[in-house]
Structure formats: C-alpha cells, structure tokens
Amino acid sequence: MNTVIAIHDAIARRLMALAPAVLPTLARAVFAAVLLMYFWRSAATKLGDGVFGFISPSSGAYIQIFPKAAEAAGYDVSQLGLFHWAVVTAGMWAEFLLPALIVAGLFTRLACLGMIGFVTVQSLTDIYGHGVTGGDLGAWFDGASGALILDQRAFWIVVLLVPVFLGGGPLSADRFLTAQRHNRATTLPT
C-alpha cells in the first residue's frame, strides 16, 4: 500500500509542477474556442450604423441590456439617458476588448475579472430583465447540466478564474512583457 501511495504522490507532484503552465494556457484556449466568437457576435449586434457605430450603439443594444427601460420608452431608445448610453457602450466595448485581451494573454488577470463581472451582469440581466426562468435558468444539484444560466455560466466563470489565480501562462503577452521588463532591468547600468 505504501508503494501505491508513493507512486500517487510522485505523479501528483509532477502534475502540480505542470499546473501553472498548463492550466492558464488551456483555460485561455478553451475560452477562445468556446466563447470568443460568442461574445464578438453579440457585440457586433450592438454596433450602430456607420463609422461611428462603436460610440452610437444600435437600438437592439439598448433592448438587450435595458429591456424594461426600452419597453417603457416605447422602444424609442432616444428617450433613454446618458447613463443608459454609457452602460450600453461600455458593455459593447467590453464584449470586444475583454475576450481579445484574454486570448492574447494581455492584462489577463484584469481581463478575466472584467469578464467575470460581465458574465454576472449578463446573467442578472437575463434573469431580471428578460425574465429567464425554469429550465433555461436551471438549478444546481438537480441532475441536469444544460441550463443556460446557472450551469453554463458557472463553467464559464470557473474557466475565467484559472487565469485570475495563475496568470496568462507561458504563452501570453503578459509573460513576454514581464520578460522584457526583467531583461531591461538587468541590463540597466547601476
């Protein structure tokens, strides 16, 4: 029995040594494969018309993010205020920029924290703004794993937490920039 435990412990030590390199890189790759285009397509639906669409969101953007306020305004989003415009515009930019930063591994921890916040607000908007309930909302520990909100988004957040704790990994812009700063610091005259 001691031999089995010793083998188990040796394997566990090797896996733990690999974790800081493998897990954040794998988490970013899974994010890119599963969620990058999801968020970019969602952001594209929020772009307004013309060259300045990135600062003049579409009506659909307001309806997606502030469904009850848009409905109260008779879907005339010009009646909504500066606060609504700022939130919708920031949300649209976040859907473009945060996933790009995560995939590149640039400011990875902050980008992942921002994305966790975004997913949380997105989920709350779906529940309270759009009235998602029942099977789409789901319930934990119910034996079903396909609910859009509680099941899927919990996995999204766990994937995003890996780089929050471990950084972007060895194949990231963060690692490259850190190495560059370290090289400059060691070559500067004292």
Image: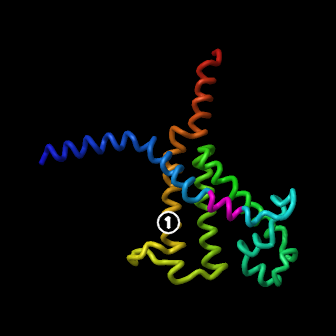
Residue 134 lies in the magenta stretch: no
Nearer the observer, 99 or 113:
99
Snapshot quadrant of residue 73: bottom right
Eyeballing the image, is 91 above or below 28? below
Residue 161 in picture, x, y percent from top left: 51, 55
Residue for badge 1: 154
Circle 1 SS class:
helix
Please determine whether, in this image, residue 156 is positioned above or below residue 103: below
| Up/down of 56 relative to 80, above or below | above
Dividing the picture into quadrants, the one containing residue 9 is top left
Segment tinted magenta in the rendering: 37-43
Instruction: Give the residue displayed 61% in from the left and 73% down from the top.
Output: 124
Q: Which residue is drawn at 71% across and 62% down?
A: 43
Residue drawn at 45 percent across, 41 percent down:
21
**Outermost residue, top side:** 189
Name the quadrant of the C terminus: top right
Looking at the image, residue 91 sits to the left or right of residue 170; the answer is right
> Is residue 162 shown left or right of residue 49?
left
* Residue at point 67%, 79% (across, down): 129
Magenta highlight: main SS: helix
In the rendering, at what x and y percent does residue 34 appear?
A: 55, 58
In this rendering, would 16 be left or right of 161? left
